[in-house]
Amino acid sequence: MWRNGSDRYGLVSISFHWAIALAFVGLVALGVWMVGLSYYDPWYNDSLALHKAIGIVALALAAAKLGWRFADRKPGLAVDLRPHERAGATVMHWCLNALIVLVPVTGYVISTSEGAGIDMFGLFEVPAVLGKTEAFRDLAIDLHYYLAYGGIALVAVHAGAALKHHFVDRGSTLKRMLNPRPPTGRRG
C-alpha cells in the first residue's frame, strides 16, 4: 500500500502528488494576491515571507518526490489510454516535474539575490548559497512569473484530462491517484 504497484500508485506517491499540487496552486494564489498589496498594507512583508517559506517547503517536497520516484517503481500508464493520450500524459508528467523544481528554484534565486537567506517560519534560515546575484535576478523574476502562470495552465489541462478520463471515458486514471489499494476483483 505504501509503495507503487505495477498498475497503481502507493500512498507515498499519492501523498506527494496532492501535497505538491496544493502547495503549487496555493503559492500561485498567494503570489497573485500579494503582488496586489501596497507597501503600506500590513500583509505586505508577511505575505512575502510566507510565500518564500512555503516555496522552500514545496522545493523540499519536489526533491523528496523525485527521490522517491527513483527509489520506487513507476506504475505503467493506465491500460485504457489511447496512444495519443499516453504520449500526452508522458509529456505532461515531464513538464510538471520540471515545473515543481524550476518555479521554487527561481523563487529562491529571487529571494536570495541580495545575499540574505530565507526565514523558515521563525525556526531557522535557509542560507543564500549564491551570494549577491543581481545578474540572475531579472531573469529569475521573468522565469518565475512565466513558469508559475504556465504551470497553472498545465495543471488545469492535467486536471481536466483526469476528470475527462474519469467521467467521460469511465477510465481508471483518477482512481489510481486517489486509492492506493490494489483492485480486489470484486464488483460492487
Image (cartoon, rainbow, N blue to C red):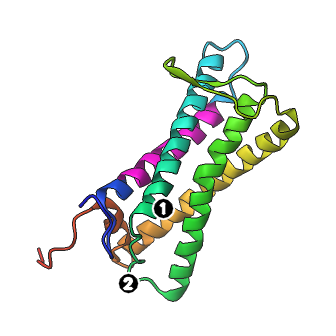
Residue 187 on image: x %, y %: 12, 78
Question: What amino acid does circle 1 point to?
Answer: Ala
- Give the residues drawn in magenta, as a range: 15-33
Residue 41 relative to residue 173: left or right? right
- The image quarter containing residue 55 is top right
**Predominant SS along the magenta part:** helix
Q: Which residue is pictured at 52% across the width and 73% down the height?
A: 89
Q: Which residue is pictured at 39% across the width and 78% down the height?
A: 78
Residue 88 relative to residue 178: left or right? right
Residue 32 on image: x %, y %: 64, 36
Residue 87 relative to residue 38: left or right? left
Residue closest to the eye, 169 or 4: 4
**Residue under numbered circle 2:** 79
Return the disc, 2 or 1, that comes first in the chain's sequence: 2
Spatial CA span between label 2 and label 1: 19 Å
Question: What amino acid does circle 2 point to?
Answer: Val
**Residue under numbered circle 1:** 159
